[in-house]
């Protein structure tokens, strides 16, 4: 993620909302990725799983076809991330990573708690979706 995005995310967090000026900046920088991210956030497609007692956190973004596991600001299991971020290096992120970042700053995501014993099963399900 670039410095511009970190500044915008900081503004979102301070104001607990996305002012039109910030939306315009995000549209200018990310185009359709921002539109998709905004849609994902407004439809509560971002999910945070916290496992107890370890406190391990997993973020999932429900896409059009699958649920995607991601590591905030670092990795997403979607094809767009793999192809355009990792291989072609055309982009710094996919819309799932952008959606998670925005949703976290807004507090606009579904939150689940599960036991550590459920982690292996859930992680296995998320991995199956990437095949």
Image: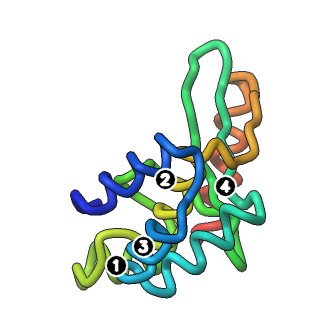
Mark 2 vs 4, N-terminal side: 4
Mark 3 vs 2, N-terminal side: 3
Mark 1 vs 2, N-terminal side: 1
Q: Quadrant of residue 87?
A: bottom left
**Vertical placement of 72 versus 4: above or below?**
above
Colour scheme of the picture: rainbow
Q: Would you say the residues marked 4 and 1 are in contact, meaning their CB atoms lie under 8 Å apart? A: no
Q: CA distance from mark 4 to mark 1?
A: 21 Å
Q: Which mark is residue 29?
A: 1
Q: Quadrant of residue 100?
A: bottom right
* Residue 39 coordinates in the image, percent (x, y): 68, 73
> Which element carries disc 2, helix, strand or loop?
helix
> Which element carries disc 4, helix, strand or loop?
strand
Q: Would you say the residues marked 3 and 1 are in contact, meaning their CB atoms lie under 8 Å apart? A: yes
Q: CA distance from mark 1 to mark 2?
A: 15 Å
Q: Residue at x 22, y 79 (%)?
A: 89
Q: Would you say the residues marked 4 and 3 are in contact, meaning their CB atoms lie under 8 Å apart? A: no
Q: Residues within 10 Å of mark 2 (few under 14, many from 20)?
A: many
**Vertical placement of 77 versus 108: above or below?**
below
Mark 4 vs 1, N-terminal side: 1
Mark 4 vs 3, N-terminal side: 3
Q: CA distance from mark 4 to mark 3?
A: 18 Å
The answer to whether residue 116 is left or right of residue 5 is: right
The quarter of the picture where the C terminus appears is bottom right
From the image, tell me which residue sits under label 4: 46
* Residue 107 coordinates in the image, percent (x, y): 64, 42
* Residue 37 coordinates in the image, percent (x, y): 57, 70
């Amino acid at each position: 993620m670039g410095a511009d995005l970190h500044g915008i995310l900081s503004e979102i967090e301070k104001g607990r909302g996305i002012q039109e000026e910030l939306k315009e900046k995000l549209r200018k920088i990310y185009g359709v990725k921002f539109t998709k991210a905004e849609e994902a956030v407004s439809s509560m497609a971002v999910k945070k799983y916290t496992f107890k007692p370890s406190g391990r956190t997993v973020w999932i973004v429900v896409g059009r076809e699958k649920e995607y596991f991601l590591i905030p600001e670092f990795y997403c299991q979607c094809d767009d991330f793999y192809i355009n971020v990792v291989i072609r290096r055309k982009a710094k992120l996919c819309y799932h990573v952008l959606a998670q970042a925005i949703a976290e700053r807004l507090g606009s995501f579904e939150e689940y708690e599960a036991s550590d014993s459920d982690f292996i099963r859930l992680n296995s399900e998320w991995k199956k979706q990437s095949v």
